[in-house]
Amino acid sequence: MQATPLPIRLRPATAEDGFLIRRWLRDPATQGCWGNRASAEAEITLARLSETALTRIVTWEKRPIGYAQAIDIGLRHGAKPPEFLPGTWDTQFCMALPRQRAKSVLAAIPALLAAEVFASTLAVACSGLVLIRQEMVARAYEQAGFRWRRIWNDPLFGPTWLMLKERPH
C-alpha cells in the first residue's frame, strides 16, 4: 500500500511574506533552529535579495506554515566544513506551526527543497547543518535522503550535525 502524499508544497517567498517570516522568527522553537531573531532576519533578507538563492514559503493545503531556503555554499561567509565541495547548496527550514512539526511533514521539506535545487541548478550536493539539540530535524533530513557525515563545530551555533545529500545520478 502506497502512502498518500502530504499536501505540502513550496512556493517562492515574496516581499509580502516578510511580516509572516518576522512573526515566525519570534517563536522560541524557530530561534532554536535559526539563532537570534535579528541575525536570522538579516540572513533571510539577504537570501531573498540574492538572484541565486531559493527562498520558499512552505504551505500545507496552500496555507503558509514555514520557511525554507537554499543557497550556494560559496556565498556563505566564514568557515565552511571541508566536506562542502564547490557547488554544494546549503539548505535550511523552519516550521511555524507546532502541530505541523510531525516527522513526515518535516521530512517532506528538505526533500522538496533538495529536489528543486537539483532540478534548477548544477549543484553537486545539498547540505544541512543541524544543531545537535534538534534531533527531530536531523531525522527529517535523514528521511529526505541526507546522510550524516560528522559533528562540526559551527563558529556561530556550536556543535552541529553535518548532513549531505549528493546529486542523484
Image (cartoon, grey):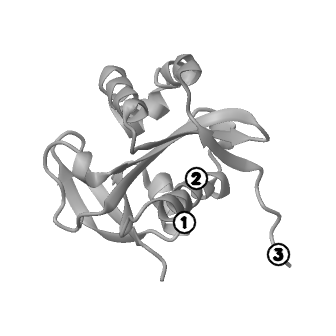
Residue 138 in picture, x, y percent from top left = 44, 58
Residue 114 in picture, x, y percent from top left = 50, 60
- Tags 1 and 2 touching, CB below 8 Å: yes
For badge 2, the amino acid type reads Ile
Residue designated by label 3: 2
- How many residues crowd around disc 1 within 10 Å: few (fewer than 14), some, or many (20 or more)? many
Q: Quadrant of residue 112?
A: bottom right
Residue 129 in picture, x, y percent from top left = 33, 54
- Tags 1 and 3 touching, CB below 8 Å: no
Residue designated by label 1: 144
Horizontal placement of 143 versus 156: left or right? right
Q: Is residue 160 above or below residue 115?
A: above
Farthest front residue?
Answer: 51
Residue 5 in picture, x, y percent from top left = 78, 61
- How many residues crowd around disc 2 within 10 Å: few (fewer than 14), some, or many (20 or more)? many
Q: CA distance from mark 3 to mark 2?
A: 19 Å
**Between 38 and 115, the one nearer to me in the picture:** 115
Dot 1: what SS? loop
**Between 13 and 40, the one nearer to me in the picture:** 13
Q: Earlier in the sequence, mark 3 or mark 2?
A: 3
For badge 1, the amino acid type reads Ala
Task: Assign the N terminus to one quadrant of the image.
Answer: bottom right
Residue designated by label 2: 109
Q: CA distance from mark 1 to mark 2?
A: 8 Å
Dot 2: what SS? helix
Farthest right residue?
Answer: 1
Horizontal placement of 133 versus 110: left or right? left
